[in-house]
Image: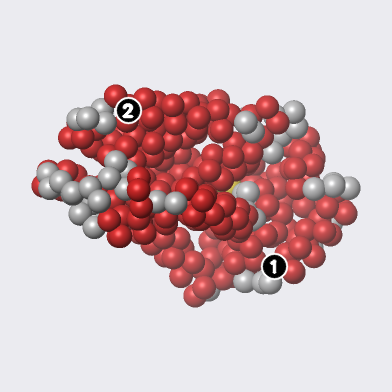
Amino acid sequence: MKSKKNICPRKQIVAYLMIISLLCLCCGCIKDKNEKECVKRFDTDAVIENEDNEHMKKTDMSFALDYKILLLAGLTVFMLSMAKNSGFYFSTIDMADGISLELTRTFYALGLIIAGIVNDKNRKLGAVLCVSTLAFPFALLVLKSSLESSIVVWILSYGFFGFFSVYRVVLFADFAGKKEKLIWIAGMGLMAGRLGDAAGVYAGMKLMDNISVLVLLAALVFMFTIFLFVLLFQKIYTPIIVSAEERKGIEDFCRSFLFSPREHDVFKLIDEGLSNTEIADRLFISENTVKFHIKNILRKTESKNRIELLNNYERYKA
């Protein structure tokens, strides 16, 4: 058994700061969501009416292909991958003999399954859990004096890597699904991630013998990555004000296909990019009821799926 070296207090401070800042980010996202849900649950009808008046009906998830957002997404995924890989080089040197590769891969496989389910239900939560993987290298640095604790955190980190891997795919798959003939975009998340992996591994290998510099570099990469992630999160998931003309377009589309009032509500949320579960939560109905309304909407518009429905809506506006 290798003897443990004393950890530099400065490195511990950096690690604690990184973990605290990430926890604040996660808590902020959850708090924002809870506050919105709380308001909606007091008076659903009043809130829906207020949203109509303020035209807060659409998110950037339904935008036409925006290359600036696409570039931001690619850079964010690149930095996420670089931060993850460079960080683990100052955490794993003394644990090689205590880790089973098969066991960690098992947790990784389980994490992929859970991440797929979570992202299918709620894209925002999946994104936040993805970025939370960046805390594990710093947690391992803090716990480095305890081999057993480090191994447990290491195994858990492999479970969370599932969210990291799924996010890289889902983010760009969502972009590709917004319009026809954009399937080529779907693989860009993996490409940006692999480039980031290479940059992180290169930095880790070059600075492995100088842990203080590596920790400082990882901390700087971490902070820049969080900055990019917050920008991307706001652009994709935060509601924005749209013009009265665009709002009227949705109403005319629904009226032309004889949507019922509830189908009208469901279609507006489909246009916002919400999943069936999120629509059910927003309208306080069951997911089966949402599926029933969507089936009727697709039948009335002669659409095969959501993508074709939104494409039909875009052609109607044109």
- Residue that badge 1 annotates: 287
> Looking at this view, is 115 or 42 the one in front?
115
Quick one: label 1 or label 2, which is nearer the N terminus?
A: 2
Q: Secondary structure at mark 2?
A: helix
- Residue that badge 2 annotates: 205
Q: Secondary structure at mark 1?
A: helix
Left or right position of 125 against 226:
right
Q: Which mark is residue 12?
A: none
Three-letter amino acid code at disc 1?
A: Glu
Provide residue 199's location: percent of width, then percent of height: 40, 26
> Looking at this view, is 266 or 199 the one in front?
199
Find out whether the residues at labels 1 and 2 contact each other: C-beta distance under 8 Å: no
Seen in the picture, residue 227 relative to 297 is either above or below; the reply is above
Camera-side mark, 1 or 2: 2
Write the residue at 32% across / 43% down: 92
Seen in the picture, residue 288 relative to 235 is either above or below; the reply is below
Provide residue 253's location: percent of width, then percent of height: 77, 47
Seen in the picture, residue 191 relative to 141 is either above or below; the reply is above
Left or right position of 206 against 106:
left
Q: Quadrant for the C terminus, please.
A: top right
Name the outermost residue toward the bottom.
Answer: 42
Three-letter amino acid code at disc 2?
A: Met
Provide residue 220's location: percent of width, then percent of height: 26, 34
